[in-house]
Image (tube, rainbow, N blue to C red):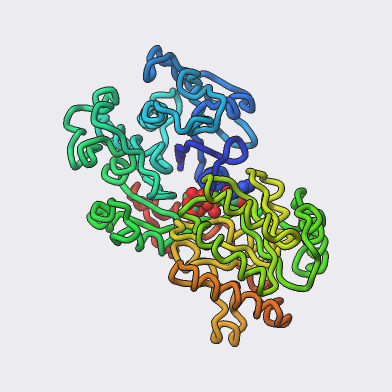
Amino acid sequence: MDLLSVTSEIYPLIKTGGLADVAGALPAALGAHHVAVKTLVPGYPQVMSQLRDTQVVIEYEDLFDGSARILAGRAAGLDLFVIDAPHLYNREGGPYGGASGDYADNWKRYAGLSFVAAELSRGKAQGYEPDVMQAHDWQSALAPAYVAYGGGRRKAKTVMTIHNLAFQGQFGRDIFWKLQLPPEAFSMSGVEYYGGVGFLKAGIQTADAVTTVSPTYAAEIRTREFGMGLDGLLNVRSDRLHGILNGIDTDAWDPGTDPFLHANYRLSTIKQREENKLALETRFGLNRDDGPLFGLVSRLTWQKGIDILSSCIDPLVNAGGRLVVLGSGDDTLESAMASAAWRHPGRVGFERSYDEPLSHLIQGGVDAILVPSRFEPCGLTQLFGLRYGAVPVVSRVGGLADTVIDANLAAVEAGVATGVQFSPVSQHALLGAINRTIALYRDERVWSRMRRNGMKFDVGWHASAAKYVKLFRELLGQATEDDDSDS
Ligand code: ADP
Ligand code: GLC
C-alpha cells in the first residue's frame, strides 16, 4: 500500500510541536506494516538544505503566483516530495511566521501545499499514484477538498487527521476565487465556513475518513466545550471519526542510548539517572535537597494551562518541591515563569527557548513531568516522561486521560499506577495533584513502582500503526478477517 502523508512540519527537518514528531515517526511505523510512506512538505530553507538525490517530478509555471518545481528526494532517512517554490516558502523566520507575527499569505502557502497534494494523489507525478492520502492539520486540510472537487477518475482515498482543533485556518471569502476550486465548493458541504473559507472545516467535510490523535479527544471534540465550533459537523461525520493514539519514536527517545543525556540508563540501571538530575541542578543553579524535582517542557500558551501552573509555583516550592521550566510562547506567560525563577533562586529555573537536547535531559533527570493542559489532543511529553522514568502529573483530558494511570488508592494497591491525574483544570485541583505527587515521592516503594510501571508502558507506535492500516484497508475495501485491532 502507498500512502502520501501531507504535513507542514516533520522531525528532524523542521519542528514547532508534536505534529512534527508524529509526521516524522509515522513513515517507519507504517513501514513496519508494509505501507510505503512518502511525505509531501513545503520547501522551507531547512528542508531544501538537507534534501538529497533529487529529481524533478512536476513543474508549474504558476503555483499561487510564482513558478514551482516538485522534487522527489530524501532527507534524514525520509522519502519526500518537496515543493520548491521560493515565493511561498523561502523565508527567514519559522514555518508559519516571523518576528512580526504570522505570514499574511499563509492561506496561499498552505493552499499550495494542499493543491499539490491533490495533484500527486491523482497520479500527476509519473509512476506514482498513492492508495491513500493523509492530510495533517489545517495546513494540509484543503487537500481532501481539492481531491473531492477534482473530478475525473479517483483512486486515492483521503484521510483528514486532526492534531489540534484550535488551529483551523479560517480566512475571508475573498480568497475563495483564488483557490481554483469550482464555484459549488463555496457551500456548506464544501469549504465555506461562516461566510469565509475554513481549511480544517473543508477537510473534515470532504475527507473519506477523519482521525484524531486519541480516543478521548475524538469523543471530546464532539462536545460544545471542546468542539471549537466544529462539534456540529464532527457529530454529523461521527461514523467516520476515529481516535487513534499517537506513539513516540522509541529509537530517538531511548534513555539507554540517548546522546543528549549525561548518563544513559535503563530500568536495571536506574540509579544512573541521578546523574542527569545533578546535571540539571547544575545547569539551572538549583539547590540540592531530597524533595522532588518537577519539570515542564512546553509551548507557553493558554492551551497548556501555563497560567494555572504559574499560580501554583509558590505553594509547590513551599511544599518542598523544585521546578525546571523549558519553553517559550506568550509574552505574559514567559514573564510569569521568569518572575517565578527570580522569586525562588535555587528552587525554580527557567530557560526561555526551544532546545531539543535540553528537553531530553529534563525528561531524563526530573522526578515528575507536569502537563496541566486545558485540552490536549494527545500530548507527547507525558509519553516521553513515562519512557524516561519522569512520572507524569497531568490533567484528565484528551490523550493525557488515555495514557496515564492515576495513582488513586485502588491503582496504588493493585500496583498499576503510572502517574497523577487531576480534574478539573483549576489551580485548586493542580495544587492537590502537586501535593499528592510530593507525598507519593516520599514513599519510596510506591514511587519506584510507579516509575517502573511507566517505563514498562508501551508508548511505541506498533499498535496504533496497525489501527491506521486497518482504517486504510477499510477505506480501500480490503478489510481482512484476521484483523482484530479496532480503531
Ligand atoms: P504540542 O504539539 O501541542 O506542542 P506535544 O506534547 O504533542 O504538544 O508535542 C510537543 C513537542 O514539542 C514535544 O516533542 C516536546 O518535547 C517539544 N517541545 C515543546 N516545547 C519545547 C521546547 N521549549 N524545547 C524543546 N522541545 C520542546
Ligand atoms: C498537537 C496537539 C498535541 C499532539 C500533537 C501531535 O500539537 O496539541 O496534543 O500530541 O499535535 O499529534
The residue that appears at 50% across and 56% down in the rendered structure is 304
User: Residue 22's spot in the image, x, y percent?
Assistant: 53, 48
In the image, is 196 to the left or to the right of 431? Answer: left
Q: Residue at x 29, y 26 (%)?
A: 179
Q: Decide if residue 364 is on the left or right side of residue 145.
A: right
Q: Quadrant of residue 269?
A: bottom right
Q: Name above or below for residue 485 compared with residue 233.
A: below
On the question of residue 464 being in view, the answer is: no
Location of the C terminus by quadrant is bottom left
Q: Is residue 63 visible?
A: yes
Relative to 322, residue 196 above or below: above
Q: Nearer the viewer, residue 66 or 74?
A: 66
Question: Residue 85 at x, y = what percent?
Answer: 48, 20
| Number of dots carrying numbers | 0
The residue sitting at 44% across, 62% down in the picture is 398
Q: Is residue 260 above or below residue 435?
A: above
In the displayed orientation, state which residue is furthest to the front: 343
Q: Residue furthest top?
A: 61
Where does the image place residue 199, in percent across and percent down from the top left?
Answer: 32, 38
* Quarter residue 391 falls in: bottom right
Q: Where the N terminus falls, by quadrant?
A: top left
Give the image location of residue 396, x and y in percent.
Answer: 47, 68
Query: In the displayed structure, does residue 480 sit left or right of residue 32?
Result: left
* Residue lying at 54% horizontally and 27% vertically, measured from the top left: 44
In this orientation, which residue lies closer to the viewer: 455 or 306? 306
- Tell whether 416 sits left or right of 139: right
Quarter of the view holding residue 14: top right
